Amino acid sequence: MAVPKRRMSKMKSKMRRGANRWRAPLLKTCPECDSAVPSHIACPNCGHYRDRKVIAVDDF
């Protein structure tokens, strides 16, 4: 069974865990209605995706 030769230093452990921090999602702007939308998702406001109307959205 593999066993570490030495204890990992505090600095190395913290550097490894630093890559797992939370990041805010990147939002794109919809070219049709200029609202913020996550990438690869149809716009919930207008229903467009890649310059096409893909879902019907009811206007209230």
Image (cartoon, rainbow, N blue to C red):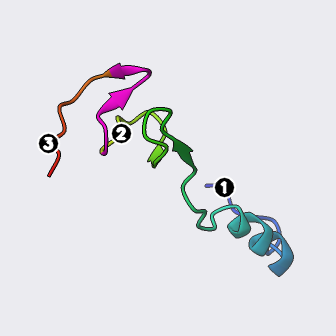
Residue 58 spot, x, y in % from top left: 14, 42
Q: Residues within 10 Å of mark 2 (few under 14, many from 20)?
A: many
The kind of residue tagged 3 is: Asp
Which numbered tag is attached to residue 50? none
Q: What's the magenta bit mostly, secondary-structure-wise?
A: loop
Residue 11 belongs to the span the image colors magenta: no
Which residue, given by chain and number where applicable, does mark 1 sit on? Answer: 2
Q: Nearer the viewer, mark 2 or mark 1?
A: 2
Question: Are the residues flagged by discs 3 and 1 in contact, CB closer than 8 Å?
Answer: no
Q: Residues within 10 Å of mark 3 (few under 14, many from 20)?
A: few
The residue lying furthest to the top in this view is 52
Residue 14 spot, x, y in % from top left: 76, 74
Q: Earlier in the sequence, mark 3 or mark 2?
A: 2
The kind of residue tagged 2 is: Cys
Tell me the SS state at disc 2.
loop
Residue 27 spot, x, y in % from top left: 54, 49
Residue placed at 74% from the left, 64% from the top?
16
